Amino acid sequence: MKEALKQPYDIPLHDIKPIIEVQEYSFYYFLGSLGLGILLISAIMYLLYRWYKKLKSFNLRVEYKKQLDALDISDTKNAAYALSHYGEIFEDDTHQHKEVYTELSVLLQEYKYKKSVANFEDETIVLIDKYRSML
C-alpha cells in the first residue's frame, strides 16, 4: 500500500522544463538612465550659468551711455571732460558719430585746461544734445 502512494509522485513530468538562468539588464538600464539624467541636468545648469553670467556682465558702452545721459552740463568744465572721455567710445560707430564727435571735441577744447570757464554756448549745447540723441 505504501508503494501505491509513492507511485504518483515518481511519475516523470514531461511538460515542465528545468529552471534556466535569465540575463537581467535592468540594473544597467537604471545606471545608464541615471547617468544620462545627470548629464542632462548638468548641461542645463551650465547653460543657465552662462546665460546668467552674460546677463550680469559689465558692458562699458552701456555704462558710458548712462553717464552721458546723466551728465550735468551746468558744470561746464567737468562736463567738457566727461563728454570727451565718455563720448570717445562711441566715436567709431558710424561716420556721423565720428563727424559730430570731432566737431564737439573742437568746441570743448576752449572749456578744458583753464582754471575758470564760462557756461556752454548755445551752439555747443545744441551739438551736445544732438550727440546724446545719436547714441
Image: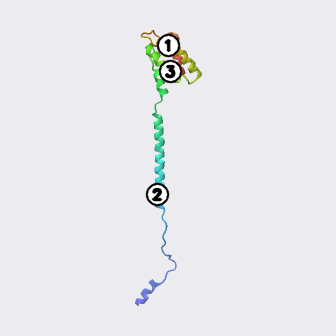
Q: Earlier in the sequence, mark 3 or mark 2?
A: 2
Q: Earlier in the sequence, mark 3 or mark 1?
A: 3
Rendering quarter of residue 93: top right
Query: Residue 52's spot in the image, x, y percent?
Result: 46, 37
Q: Secondary structure at mark 1?
A: helix
Q: Tell me which amino acid carries mark 2.
A: Phe
Q: Which residue is mark 3?
A: 87
Query: Residue 54's spot in the image, x, y percent?
Result: 48, 35
User: Does the CB distance between marks 3 and 1 fall below 8 Å?
Assistant: no
Q: Secondary structure at mark 2?
A: helix
Query: Residue 56's spot in the image, x, y percent?
Result: 45, 34
Residue at 46% in and 44% down: 45
Q: How many marks?
A: 3
Q: Which residue is mark 2?
A: 30
* Scheme of colours in the image: rainbow
Residue at 49% in and 66% down: 23
Rendering quarter of residue 3: bottom left
Q: Tell me which amino acid carries mark 1.
A: Gln
User: Does the CB distance between marks 1 and 2 fall below 8 Å?
Assistant: no
Front: mark 3 or 1: 1
Q: Residues within 10 Å of mark 1 (few under 14, many from 20)?
A: few
Can you tell which mark lies on residue 109? Answer: 1
